[in-house]
């Protein structure tokens, strides 16, 4: 049985990225309402005349679920809000091709999917900056895994790279777009770093402001207009508080909210030690509000994910945490040397 890690990759290998647009046919079938998997399969097979290739239902259903376009419950399939959004901008014919609006909606989900992100980063990290206008990767210069080949093909399908017989190329505009879509993408320059930080900080602020409005509305609807006026974005004046927004439950108790966001539907975020310590000290009052596809703000199509006492969710295995950075310090005294003439005769030198 395919694991969560390789389900999307296996589906893409089966239908090939060049035929990715066949997902349109699945969206059309489900646009008419919820259907069982069996009925969906038959409907897709009957749509063969609309495609240049034979449609294999299972891979497209897997892709749809993995990218958050459809959901399954009790073997019944239905479109999610993202699926309806992608279908609403479809253009026909051709029926099995994605237009640019659809690609723009789907790109964050592909680039941010856990089974694809590191492969995208691997390909991009090998690209050489030829000039301010273009970056290239010479095909055949290194052996690629099948996962990297798939991601390279997806970059072309999304219009984020072009390829000829020798090179994979990304223009400066394409690279900027990749930089904004792919979290943790290998950056080319200091300018790229500052641009990435600027976009991330802007997204974070917009997400926090959205949560403030949401909390004020929630309390107002609960009949606590007095409390709604007290909701504050604490991060505006104290970024080390351990949380971003101070709100309240309808009984007047405090709700400490840490706001996390991303540009796709994957629920994943980074947590600082200060935030974790605060969560431990205020477990029953501590929440993480996760804002998916925050680039769509202020019009959030997909709602908030609200996680109370996330440390408990970690203990119960509902969420998983993995280290991505380590603090390193000296365990013994060292000699501080400022003389470059003897630097080659010591083990440690601090400049």
Image (cartoon, helix red, strand yellow):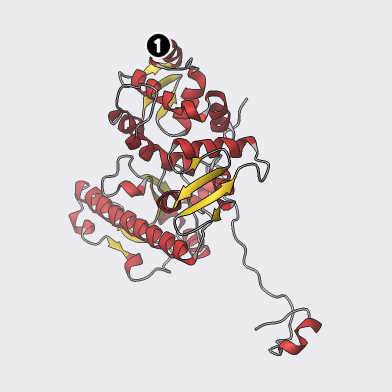
- Whether residue 51 is visible to the viewer of this picture, yes or no, is yes
State the residue in front, 180 or 80.
180
State the residue in front, 64 or 144.
144
Identify which residue is drawn at 45% across, 20% down.
Answer: 74
State the residue in front, 297 or 312.
297
**Left or right of 301, for residue 47:** right
Identify which residue is drawn at 44% across, 17% down.
Answer: 52
Residue 149 percent location from the top left of the image: 59, 37
Identify which residue is drawn at 35% across, 30% down.
Answer: 83
Quarter holding residue 229 = bottom left
Tag count: 1
Residue 184 percent location from the top left of the image: 51, 54
**Left or right of 80, for residue 226:** left
Residue extending furthest toward the front: 165
- Whether residue 265 is visible to the viewer of this picture, yes or no, is no
Of the 4 image quadrants, the one containing the N terminus is top right
Q: Which residue is mark 1?
A: 49
Of the 4 image quadrants, the one containing the C terminus is bottom right
Query: Could you tell me which secondary element the residue under label 1 belongs to?
Result: helix
Give the vertical position of 110 relative to 240 (above or below). Answer: above
Identify which residue is drawn at 71% across, 90% down.
Answer: 339
Residue 284 percent location from the top left of the image: 43, 54
Question: Badge 1 local density, few (<14 within 10 Å), some, or many (20+)?
Answer: few
State the residue in front, 229 or 261.
261
**Left or right of 68, for residue 343:** right
Residue extending furthest toward the right: 345
Quarter holding residue 197 = bottom left
Residue 163 percent location from the top left of the image: 51, 40
Give the vertical position of 140 relative to 94 (above or below). Answer: below
């Amino acid at each position: 049985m395919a694991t969560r890690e390789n389900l999307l990759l296996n589906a893409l290998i089966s239908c090939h990225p060049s035929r990715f647009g066949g997902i349109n046919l699945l969206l059309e079938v489900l646009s008419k309402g919820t259907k069982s998997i069996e009925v969906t399969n038959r409907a897709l097979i009957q749509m063969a005349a609309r495609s240049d290739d034979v449609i294999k239902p299972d891979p497209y259903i897997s892709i749809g679920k993995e990218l958050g376009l459809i959901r399954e419950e009790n073997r019944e399939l239905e479109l999610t809000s993202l699926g309806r959004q992608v279908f609403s901008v479809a253009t026909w014919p051709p029926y099995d091709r994605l237009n640019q609006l659809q690609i723009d909606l789907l790109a964050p989900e592909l680039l941010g999917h856990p089974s694809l992100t590191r492969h995208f980063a691997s390909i991009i990290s090998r690209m050489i900056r030829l000039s301010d206008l273009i970056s290239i990767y010479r095909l055949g210069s290194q052996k690629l895994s099948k996962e990297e080949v798939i991601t390279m093909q997806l970059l072309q399908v999304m219009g984020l790279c072009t390829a000829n017989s020798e090179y994979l190329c990304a223009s400066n505009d394409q690279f900027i777009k990749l930089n904004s879509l792919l979290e943790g993408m290998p950056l080319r320059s200091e300018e790229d770093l500052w641009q990435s930080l600027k976009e991330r900080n802007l997204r974070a602020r917009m997400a926090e402001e959205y949560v403030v409005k949401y909390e004020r509305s929630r309390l107002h609807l609960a009949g606590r207009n007095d409390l709604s006026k007290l909701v504050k974005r604490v991060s505006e004046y104290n970024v080390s508080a351990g949380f971003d927004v101070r709100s309240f439950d309808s009984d007047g108790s405090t709700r400490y909210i840490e706001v996390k966001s991303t540009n796709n539907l994957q629920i994943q975020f980074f947590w600082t030690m200060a935030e974790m310590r605060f969560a431990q000290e205020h477990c029953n009052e501590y929440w993480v509000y996760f804002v998916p596809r925050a680039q769509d703000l202020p019009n959030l199509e997909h709602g908030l994910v609200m996680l109370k006492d996330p440390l408990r969710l970690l203990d119960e295995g509902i969420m998983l945490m993995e280290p991505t950075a380590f603090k390193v310090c000296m365990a013994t005294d060292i000699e501080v040397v400022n003389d470059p003439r003897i630097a080659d005769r010591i083990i440690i030198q601090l400049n």
